[in-house]
Amino acid sequence: MSFSLGCRHCDEPLCVYSCLTGALYKDAKTGIVAVDTEKCIGCWTCVMACPYGAISPDTARKKASKCDLCFHLEQPACVVNCPNGALVWGETNA
Amino acid sequence: MLEADYVIIGNSAGGIGAIEAIREIDGKGSVLLISEEPYPAYSRPLISEFLAGERDLDGILYRPRDFYEQHRVQTLFGKSAVQMNAKAKELILDDRQKVAYGKLLLAVGGRPIVPPMEGLEKEGVFTFTKLDDARRIKTYLAQAKKAVVIGGGLIGISVTEALHKLGIEVTIVELMDRILGAVLDETASRMVEEKVRKAGVEIRTGRTVKAIIGKEGVEGRVGGVILDNGERIPCDLVIVAIGVSPRTELLRETSIRVNRGIIVDRHMATNIPDIYACGDVAESYDFINGGDRVVPIWPNAHIGGRIAGYNMAGREIAYPGGTAMNSLKYFGMPIASAGIVNAGKDHETLSRRDDGRYQKLALKDGKITGMVLVGDIAPAGIFFGLMRDHIDVTRFKDSLLSDRFGLISLPENILRKRLELPDLGRLHVFDEPEACTESTSGK
């Protein structure tokens, strides 16, 4: 059993603070926490630092894997592909 | 004379963390960074990949090349502070230049421990904590086939792996009865040991190197080592990888309080006003043993540096504490450990082991105080979080080491509380400029 808990793009990104190589970063404009896969060495220190378990060790690619809200796309792929439109994408003031 | 509002000595995890925090708060104050290494900040753990030829300097940089410009930091690379006058708030550099500071951060790190032994002066003896060490070893390898690595800890195993990738035959000599004894328990040590041996690396445990001997015909060069039991191991180079100790030599003539490392409070401040310290040179709060100690690991240095930076810039934020935590991959085997790894009888232990996987948690008074994970480290983050926040896991401890364990396994009241986000003082730097000074604390 599981429930959906993706990366929360924390204000205090412990994964970014713990990253040994500088591969993880929090984008200054969008606040999105993302992985530079060129720099990631798959040491999994970030996996250990994230209290939400939101970073997965991608053992095949040997890179940390996490939700980056598909920042390179117009909308996250999960939202675009949700068959019932249950996932929505937008900003709130919460 | 140079002067700056903020002077930072040390250009690694802690120094960079401080710069980032200072600039979140103070865009105007002048920042001067002094570093004896002539490079922009690089990832120290990656020097083994550099040595192995897998990454060049650009590939191991910790921040983009324009980081200093972006953060308006004046840099003095290749210079070191040799004297300090805390009363006059001045430093003297090795080139006799004077530097006046408003606030000072000592993020100078550790120095490799090299115990006295015969033959240390020979050509071919190295330590392995800096990029220049990796560079020197790389050059020397042109004439080398065999290496002896003294110390089977984190640095020792990482340099061993790099040398092994380059086709060098390596023998590790470890004083304890097993490798990685400080970060792993016995079972995990044996698993890694088997992996390392299978790769063709020799390991001698319970042994020390008594003397480094010269090469036949070229006495000034390393030709082998003699162990305390008399065994002679021929080799072309020796790497001393025993560990690091805080670099406190700059403080000798000051009244800054030093125990093993520089003593700091939860604001990373020393006993002298306007002087702060963080990282491998400092003794900082350990949330597992509840005291202050030197925990020379990268994440703690960076977070400590951030906290120091905030406080230097006038924002009072307390260091939440850190503890020993290491996540690594040696010879393809992932391992993660934290807190108390060799728990005594006063601890309850949960563990499971199947092919290539081993997971162990140490519990005391219902709380996780230590963990060792080998092979599958995916739940490490949730465990570490529960450990850091001293959550009583009694009610769900049976689910901790099950394949289905996840945050959902936590009782709802604990889970809801855990979904609140931490606050270490960071500002919403990604907001619109006018919101920059708004704080996110006090929720």
Image: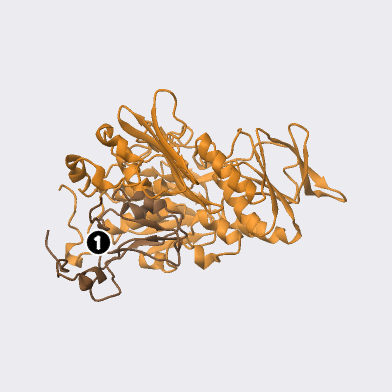
Chain colours: A brown, B orange
Rendering coords of residue B73 (x, y %): 39, 62
Left or right placement of residue B213 versus residue A57 in this view = right
Q: Nearer the viewer, residue A87 or B248?
A: A87
Left or right placement of residue B280 versus residue B209 in this view = left
Rendering coords of residue B44 (x, y %): 51, 54
Q: Residue furthest top?
A: B346
Task: Name the chain letter of the residue that bears numbered label 1.
Answer: B
Q: Nearer the viewer, residue B207 or B223?
A: B207
Left or right placement of residue B16 versus residue B218 in this view = left
Rendering coords of residue B141 (x, y %): 71, 59
Name which residue type carries label 1. Val
Q: Is residue B433 above or below residue B370?
A: below
Which quadrant of the figure has residue B66? bottom left
Q: Residues within 10 Å of mark 1 (few under 14, many from 20)?
A: many
Q: Residue furthest right?
A: B217
Left or right placement of residue B188 versus residue B223 in this view = left
Rendering coords of residue B341 (x, y %): 45, 35
Q: Is residue B253 visible?
A: yes
Q: Which residue is mark 1?
A: B429
- Disc 1, SS: loop
Q: Is residue B131 above or below residue B66?
A: above
Q: Is residue B429 above or below residue B239?
A: below
Q: Which residue shows up at 27% across the image and 75% down it?
A: A73
On the rendered image, what quadrant is the N terminus of chain B found in?
A: bottom left
Q: Is residue B201 above or below residue B352?
A: below
Q: Is residue B321 visible?
A: no
Q: Residue furthest bottom?
A: A74
